[in-house]
């Protein structure tokens, strides 16, 4: 049940890292808010990925 969801978050995380790497040089002093948003979104994606991984392992064990 959670395996496709876990795969989705892995794919989204990869795309997010690629987008962030491409756009990191486009930030200047006036766009710090946008950079902060990218950092927050990255943290949220990592937390969601970790939660899905833990849920998948728990379901497989049970």
Image: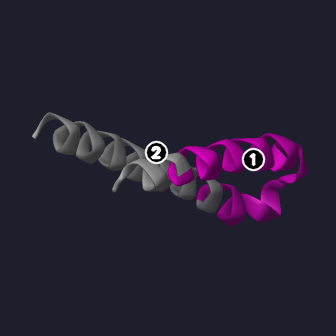
Q: Who's the residue at 45% across and 56% down the image?
A: 5
Mark 1 closeness class: few <14, some 14–19, many ≥20 residues within 10 Å:
some
Residue at the left extreme?
62
Which secondary structure class fits the magenta region best?
Answer: helix
Residue at (26, 40) in percent of width and height? 54
Task: Answer few, some or many: residues within 10 Å of disc 2's Cα (few below 14, many 20 plus, some between 14 and 19).
Answer: some
User: Label for residue 20?
Assistant: 1
In front: 31, or 20? Answer: 20
Q: Which residues are magenta?
A: 8-36
Dot label at residue 6: none
For the rendered model, the colour scheme is one colour
Name which of mark 2 and mark 1 comes first in the sequence.
1
Residue 50 % position (x, y): 36, 42
Q: Nearer the viewer, residue 53 or 4?
A: 4
Q: Is residue 15 magenta?
A: yes
Figure quadrant of the N terminus: bottom left
Residue 37 placement: quadrant: bottom right
Residue at 46 percent of width and 45 percent of height:
46
Which mark identifies residue 46? 2
For label 1, the SS is helix
Reply yes or no: does residue 62 show up in magenta.
Answer: no
Give residue 8's position: percent from left, percent from top.
55, 54
């Amino acid at each position: 049940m959670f395996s496709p969801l876990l795969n989705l978050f892995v794919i989204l995380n990869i795309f997010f890292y690629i987008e962030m790497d491409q756009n990191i040089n486009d930030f200047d002093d006036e766009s710090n808010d946008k950079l902060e948003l990218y950092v927050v979104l990255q943290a949220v994606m990592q937390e969601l990925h970790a939660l899905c991984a833990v849920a998948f392992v728990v379901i497989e064990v049970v």
